Each structure stands twice: as C-alpha cells, then as structure tokens.
Image: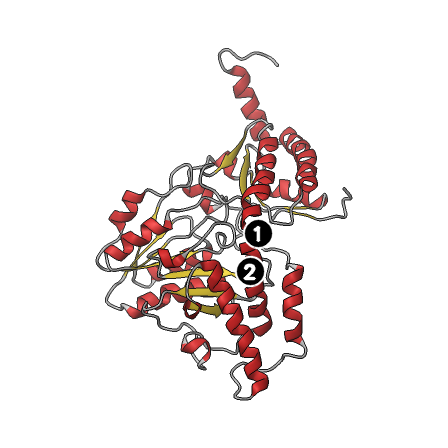
Amino acid sequence: MSHQQVVYLDNNATTRTAPEVVAAMLPFFGEHYGNPSSMHSFGGAVKAHIDRARQQVADLLGCLAEEVIFTSCGTESDNAAIMSALRSFPHKRHVVTTRVEHPAVLNFCQDLAGRGYEVTFLPVDRQGNLDLDQAAEAIREDTAIVSVMWANNETGVIFPVTEIAQMAKAKGALFHTDAVQAVGKVPIKLSETAIDLLSLSGHKLHTPKGVGVLYVRKGTPFVPYIMGGHQEHGRRAGTENVPYIVGLGRACQLAAERMVEENTRVKALRDRLEKGLLQVEATMVNGDPARRLPNTSSVSFEYVEGESILLMLSDLGICASSGSACTSGSLEPSHVLRAMGVPFTAAHGSIRFSLSYYTTQEEVDYVLQHLPPIIERLRKISPFWARHQARACAAPGYVQP
C-alpha cells in the first residue's frame, strides 16, 4: 500500500460522503433550486423531496415522519433538546446527564450549572458502563430532562437508554439521547421506547457536514431553539438546506441496507485490528467488550504519548484520533477515559480507531504492519517505559526473556 494512500480509521469524527448520497444531492444544486416554502409549483416540487427524506429518516429511526425535525448538526439538536425541556418546565431546575457525554451535551450542561441549574453528572465504571440503580436514584420530581448518549463516541460503549428513558418517564422527566454514533450501527425503533428526544448528525452517516436531525416524540412539549420563519412546522426556523436534507434521507436508506454488514464484516475487521494490537506488550482495549458499537476501538498503549503515535501514523497515511475530534488540540487525557479510571500512563497513550462500511482488510493489515514498530520506537525514548521495565526487572520471580 502506497504511503500516499489514505487509510481512514477516524469515522467517528466524520465519514466520507457516499457516492449514492452525492448523486442524490446534485440535482438540488442545479435544476431543483426552488425554495420549498414558496407557493408556486417549482418550490412545491422541492418540498416533496424534503417530505420523502423525512420519511426515509423516520424509517431508519422507527418513528413517524412528523416527529423528525431537520437541523444543522448534532450539536444544535442536542442544545435544542435540552433547552426546550428547560423552557417547557421552567419550575424544574434539575438536569441529569453523564460524565462521558460528547462536548455538545457536557459543555452545555456545565454552562447550565454555572447559571444556577443543578446538574447531576452520572459516573461510569472501569468498563465505561453506567449503574442503572444510580441513574434511577438521580432522577427526581424536579428533574426537567435526562440526557444520556446512546453510544459513546470514544469507546463505543452502548448505554441502556431504553431502560433509563422508562425511569425518566416514571418521574415525569423528559428523556433525550445523543444517538449521533449509534444511528446506522445499531437497530433503533423509537416507537417501541419511551425516548422523547433523539439527536443525530448526517456527517457520521456518510452525508456532508451541515445537516442533522432532532426527533421529538409526538405530544412532547417543545419550544423552538431557533426562531423566525415557519419552517419545520414552526419548530426550527431557517430556509431548509435542501441538498443536504435529501442527501441525509438517502444516507439513512443506505444505513438500513448496510446495518447487517456493519455488525458482521466491519465488526470482524475491528476485532482483527484489536487482536493484532493486543499482541503489543502493555496494551489494553478500553470499554465493555460485550456492549460496544461494531466499528469502534479505543486502544491504550501504556507509557507513550498518543499525539506522537498519531503524528507517526499520519506520516504513513493512517488517520485515527486520540478521542473526540471536538476536543482534539488539548493535551489533557480524554475526559471519557479519566471518568472510567483508566490509569494516567495509559490514558495519555490512547488511540481511537473507528471503521466504516468502506474499510478493507488490506487497510487493517497495513495498520497492524506499521503500528507495533511505532510503539516500540516511542517506548525506546520514553522515560516512563524505562522506569516500568526497571520495576518489572526488580519484581520477585522475574526471568530475563
């Protein structure tokens, strides 16, 4: 494999736009340029395509088309869901979320805490799982909303959102889930759950950046976050981003068709990658192995810096990340791994690999060929590794290899 070729294993950060999605979008940059809110038939014809896309999204989510609101991104959807709950129930000043949410929820909730709201941040265990009893205890009569991600963007750990939604409902609180990483990777049938609000993002589903969805269960109180025109039945103002909405509809169709392959072939490639990397000494996989997304792997290489690993991989055309792309640039270890209690020496050397439908075995094997020697080179210059080796040699019963 040529070093000029890109091996893209950072699909939880963003995905390539599927060729089928590009083909669906192109007419709406040209001949179908009408405004869907216009009275004339030229604009009305465009509206029909938005309605079709709305149904395609609803089919993937297992909900009604009228429950789908198009937004600009997952972050907008997350913010809109939480703010709507607080404005719908102004007498309720308590919010429940987790310590491992995406910054779109975590930072929003931290801002709320600074503005007088009470926020409970639920902890996770060493495997990245929530304690359902703790969650139940945290939800109170004055809780406006509970927001728990469907699956973690760094470790892929899947949370029991349907169970927590039932707990919230029993206490009279709304339940929201950031399902940005889960949609298209795990089956979702919202009509059979107590989930009130759900966020998704198009660019994690092989659609361009700039379109998302907020699902609002029929009958759920909702106050618009962006106000202005009557678009989206008065729930989200702003002229519709028609090409991207059409693209998202097509992407949801493709996701439904490819979900079995995502959970078989793609999962097998992820497992092959992990099995190979675990041959490297002092390496661990983060997150509950039994409850994870099929495409995601968080691997910690102890006593080396993740940034150095990523730069050396990048020189070889391999794209991965040290955590959420929305928090990259910080030298602090991932907030998710810190919340899980991953040792400092391992958290700093953590790499997230996230595969997609387009990932091949050749690409995985290319990583397995080049990454172990990178770890070996970095450990040779790591004072932490030298200290670890010295301690190991001094341990009782040590035998020189």
- Pointer 2 residue: 253
Q: Which of the labelled discs sits on residue 363, or is there none?
A: none
| Local SS, label 1 | helix
Residue positioned 67% across, 79% down in the render: 31
- Pointer 1 residue: 258
Residue 15 position, x and y percent, is 61, 55
Count all numbered tags in the image, as a single digit. Answer: 2
Q: In the visual, does 57 lie left or right of 376?
A: left
> Looking at the image, what colour scheme do you see?
secondary structure
Q: Nearer the viewer, residue 35 or 306?
A: 35
> Alpha-carbon neighbours of circle 1 within 10 Å: few (<14), some, or many (≥20)?
some
Q: Determine the image quadrant of residue 195.
A: bottom left
User: The residue under label 1 is which amino acid type?
Assistant: Arg
Q: In the visual, does 121 lie left or right of 55?
A: left
Q: Is residue 110 visible?
A: no
Residue positioned 56% across, 30% down in the render: 384
Residue positioned 27% across, 69% down in the render: 90
Residue positioned 54% across, 66% down in the render: 211
Which numbered disc, 1 or 2, marks the residue that appears first in the sequence? 2
Residue 113 position, x and y percent, is 33, 59
Residue 270 position, x and y percent, is 58, 40
Q: Nearer the viewer, residue 380 or 258?
A: 258
**Alpha carbons under labels 1 and 2: distance apart:** 9 Å
| Local SS, label 2 | helix
Q: Is residue 151 visible?
A: yes
User: The residue under label 2 is which amino acid type?
Assistant: Gln
Quadrant including the N terminus: top right
Q: Does residue 181 sit above or below 72 in this rendering?
A: above
